[in-house]
Amino acid sequence: MFGIDSPELLVILVVALVVIGPKELPALLKTWGKWMATMRGMASEFRGHVDEMVRQSELDQVKKHLESSTGGLDFKSLDPTKEMRSIIQEGVAEGEKALADAKTSLDTPPSDNPPADNQLAEPDSAPQIAVDPAPESLAAAPEALAAVVSPTEPEAAVPPETPAAASREDKPKAAAAG
């Protein structure tokens, strides 16, 4: 504190006690403390005003720099909602166009709408259908079918059928034979 060490401060207090007296010293210290508090308040207020002027000066310099470099600020052009809105509108327009194209292609008959050179009439690959292997009980089905078919018909003329279709054919033949 002001370059005064503790022994020097002790000497000053002893001298003040002798000169001022023990009765007046507490009132003097109280007055001196109020005066110091007032001085600190004024100094901090002054410092705050100086800091505010410096910040304002820096903001003005930045504002001038931005205005000079961009030819003026246009905050409306910096609005991100406009850009998002335009992107969404473009996507909606593309979707409506694709929907209209699909609708017209469905409404026109196939004979009136021949495929273009770069389009194929058939899709690139047909959908694949998974087939389960036949259960072991159906392994004897061709032999049972051969027994039902009359011996005068050649076996090559019998088309391959599913087990359900073979069982449906067995009933009418059995009814005709019986």
Image (spheres, rainbow, N blue to C red):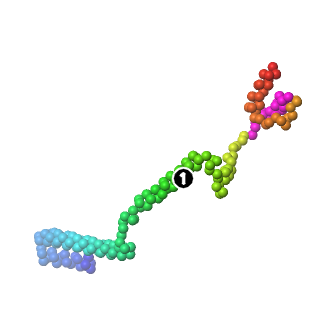
Q: Position of residue 2 (x, y in %)?
A: 25, 78
Q: Position of residue 27 (x, y in %)?
A: 13, 69
Q: Position of residue 21 (x, y in %)?
A: 12, 73
Q: In the displayed structure, does residue 87 sit left or right of residue 49?
A: right
The residue lying furthest to the top in this view is 178
Q: Position of residue 101 (x, y in %)?
A: 55, 51
The correct choice, above or below, for 117 with respect to 103 in the image is below
Out of 162 and 11, give the one closest to the viewer. Answer: 162
Q: Residue at x 76, y 37 (%)?
A: 134
SS class of the residue under badge 1? Answer: helix
Q: Residue at x 83, y 28 (%)?
A: 148
The residue lying furthest to the front in this view is 112
Q: In the displayed structure, does residue 128 sit left or right of residue 175?
A: left
The correct choice, above or below, for 152 with respect to 15 in the image is above
Give residue 73's quadrant in the image.
bottom left
The correct choice, above or below, for 84 with respect to 7 in the image is above
Give residue 45's quadrant in the image.
bottom left
Q: Residue at x 75, y 40 (%)?
A: 133
Query: How crowded is the residue under tag 1: few (<14 C-alpha within 10 Å), some, or many (20+)?
Result: few
Name the residue that disc number 1 marks: 98
Q: In the displayed structure, does residue 127 sit left or right of residue 178?
A: left
Q: Residue at x 81, y 19 (%)?
A: 178
Out of 96 and 56, give the one closest to the viewer. Answer: 96
Q: In the displayed structure, does residue 18 sit left or right of residue 137?
A: left
Q: Quadrant of the N terminus?
A: bottom left
The answer to if 135 sits in the magenta stretch is yes
For the residue marked with disc 1, what is the amino acid?
A: Ala
